[in-house]
Image: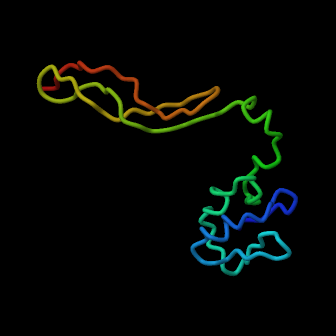
Amino acid sequence: MFYIDEEKCIGCKICVNVCPTQAISMVAGKAVIDGNKCIDCGECARVCPRDAVYSKADSRQNIPPNQENNLPNFGFGMGSGMGRGMGTGAGRGFGKGMGRGLGRGTHDGRGGGRGGGRGWK
C-alpha cells in the first residue's frame, strides 16, 4: 500500500486526479489514501511532484538523496546477445546470453558470446 508524507504533500491534487479507483481524497488540504480502495498501481507516486507518496516496501525512502548513487548495484539479468552457432555447417548464430553485473548502473544482461561455432554432424 502507498502512504502520504504529510510534511511533503502540498495539496496539489495531482494524485487525486490520476488514481484509477478514487482511493485518494483531500482532508485538511492534504492527500489521504483509502487502503480499502488502493490497488497499489503506483500512479500516485509516479506523478507526485514532491515525492510525498511512498510505499513501505520502498526502502529507498530511508536513503538520503545525495547518497543513493554511492551504493553498489548488484545486477543479474538475461537478454539476447551473440551466441555460438550450433547446427550443421560453420554457423554464426544469435543466441540467448546471460549476464551478471557488479558495480554502478544498470546491468541488463546482454549476452557476450561470439558467433562462429563448429558445425555438429
Q: Position of residue 41 (x, y in %)?
A: 59, 65
Rendered residue at 75%/53% (across/down): 50
- Identity of the residue furthest to the bottom in this view: 36
Q: Which quadrant, please, contains the N terminus?
A: bottom right
When asked about the image quadrant of residue 25, the answer is: bottom right
The answer to whether 39 is drawn above or below residue 46 in the figure is below
Q: Position of residue 121 (x, y in %)?
A: 12, 26
Rendered residue at 31%/27% (across/down): 83
Rendered residue at 83%/47% (across/down): 62
Q: Nearer the viewer, residue 47 or 3?
A: 47
Q: Position of residue 88 (x, y in %)?
A: 12, 27
Q: Position of residue 26 (x, y in %)?
A: 77, 75
Rendered residue at 22%/29% (across/down): 86
Q: Give the total number of marks visible in the rendering.
A: 0
- Left or right side of 23 for 118: left
Q: Nearer the viewer, residue 58 or 76?
A: 58
The answer to whether 52 is drawn above or below residue 26 in the figure is above
Q: How is the image coloured?
A: rainbow
When asked about the image quadrant of residue 102, the answer is: top right
